[in-house]
Image (cartoon, grey):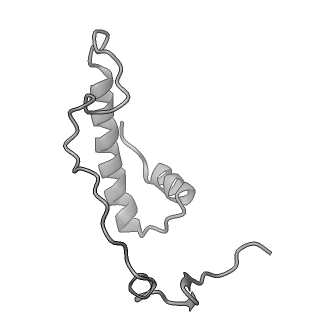
């Protein structure tokens, strides 16, 4: 499924992205390739596959064990903050 640059502009507007004409052309090709791949996946017969809630079966997760570790001090956490109020991040007010 080939996307037009107009469709890419519409998607970019919905995502609030500003794209150059070169980016629009490149993304039209990339998004079209993704949609073509999804179309191929739609052709697979998955009628015998049981639905899953997770990509890995229960008990087979390769995640690390939960461990309690010391957290950051307020000074460490706010070291790169552009603005702070005491021990909190200071952000612009957005609701009047």
Q: Is residue 69 above or below residue 74?
A: above
Residue 80 higher or lower than 48, as above or below: below
Residue at 30% of width from left, 35% of height from top? 36
Work out which residue is located at the far right of the displayed protein and give it. Answer: 96
Note whether 49 is above or below 75 in the view shown: above
Q: What residue lies at 49% left-to-right and 49% top-to-bottom?
A: 7
Q: Nearer the viewer, residue 35 or 59?
A: 59
Q: Residue at x 60, y 81 (%)?
A: 91
Q: In screen coordinates, is 46 left or right of 78?
A: left
Q: Position of residue 93 (x, y in %)?
A: 70, 79
Vertical relation: 27 (above or below) 49: below
Frontmost residue, 53 versus 36:
53
Where residue 10 sits in the image (x, y, percent)? Answer: 54, 53
- Residue 83 or residue 25, whichever sits in front: 83
Instruction: Locate residue 70, reporting x and y percent.
Output: 33, 71
Q: Is residue 59 left or right of residue 91?
A: left
């Amino acid at each position: 499924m080939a996307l037009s640059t107009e469709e890419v502009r519409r998607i970019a507007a919905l995502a609030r992205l500003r794209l150059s004409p070169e980016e629009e052309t490149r993304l039209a090709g990339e998004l079209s390739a993704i949609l073509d791949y999804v179309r191929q996946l739609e052709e697979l017969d998955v009628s015998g596959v049981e639905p899953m809630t997770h990509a890995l079966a229960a008990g087979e997760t390769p995640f690390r064990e939960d461990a309690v570790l010391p957290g950051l001090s307020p000074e460490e956490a706010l070291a790169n903050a552009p603005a702070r109020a005491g021990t909190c991040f200071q952000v612009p007010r957005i609701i009047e």
